[in-house]
Image: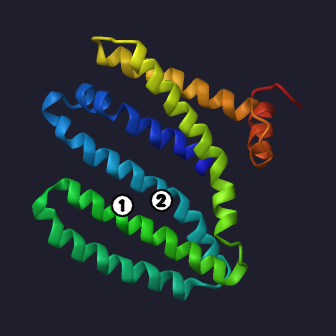
Amino acid sequence: NATILLPILIGMAWISESFVALLLGEKWLPAVQSLQIFLVSFIFISLTNPIAAINNAIGQVKYQTLIRAVLAVFLIIALVKLTPYGIEYSASSVLVYNLLMFIGSYSLLNTRLNFGWFKLVETLVPPLMMVSSMVLVLYIIGYYIELDSMALLMLIDVVVGGVFYALLLLMLPIRKLSFLRNRILRRIGFTS
């Protein structure tokens, strides 16, 4: 999930200003910060859902539901209290909810399967490094190339970011990503 969804969500956060300006117009630019917060929140959702499914599959349904229920109460209270201060506060409440859901679900998984937090970090480091490299390349391009056209800038960011990330995925000899890399190479016909 992280290998596929991180570049999409971080990439969307990167182009969010251009995206909002082009799709909704300049008057919606104040919504960019909230969109970026929601996109970070979606990262935690994408990581939590498989963990929660595993918890349910190994018989931890009761505790997984309890975590979800307690955090849902927290989210409702946070939304009621913070929404009057602006959408950024609501988005931040959703982000904290999803972060806590991720931590709670993974902690529950650890009680039964004892993976440890180091295993999680070890799994997430390769996609995080590749996404960081992608963002660095996009930053450098944005620093040296000034364009008046937001549409062209967004197109360049999407194409360069996507191609750069795909090349990293296919070319870096990261053992943890070999299954995905080999599957992609088979699909596009480079291996049998």
Give coordinates of residue 68: x percent, y percent. Answer: 43, 78
Q: Which residue is located at x 15 percent, y 72 percent?
A: 81
Q: Residues within 10 Å of mark 2 (few under 14, many from 20)?
A: many
Locate the C terminus and report the quarter of the image it occupies: top right
Q: Nearer the viewer, residue 110 or 159?
A: 110
Give coordinates of residue 38: x percent, y percent. Answer: 34, 52
Q: Amino acid at mark 1?
A: Leu
Note whether 1 is above or below 131 in the view shown: below
Q: Which residue is located at x 60 percent, y 25 percent?
A: 164
Q: Nearer the viewer, residue 189 or 84?
A: 84
Note whether 53 is above or below 188 in the view shown: below
Note whether 157 is above or below 37 in the view shown: above
| Left or right, 118 with reference to 33 | right
Q: Nearer the viewer, residue 113 or 135?
A: 135
| Left or right, 172 with reference to 37 | right
The residues tagged by marks 1 and 2 sit, at their Cα atoms, a distance apart of 8 Å
Note whether 10 is above or below 40 in the view shown: above
Q: Residues within 10 Å of mark 1 (few under 14, many from 20)?
A: many
Give coordinates of residue 46: x percent, y percent. Answer: 52, 56
* Element under disc 2: helix
Q: Residue furthest right?
A: 192
Q: Earlier in the sequence, mark 1 or mark 2?
A: 2
Q: Amino acid at mark 2?
A: Phe
Question: Which residue bears the numbered disc 1?
Answer: 95
Label annotation for residue 44: 2
Quarter of the rendering containing residue 98 = bottom left
Q: Are marks 1 and 2 in contact (CB under 8 Å)?
A: yes
Q: Residue furthest left?
A: 84
Give coordinates of residue 16: x percent, y percent. Answer: 33, 35
Q: Residue furthest bottom?
A: 62
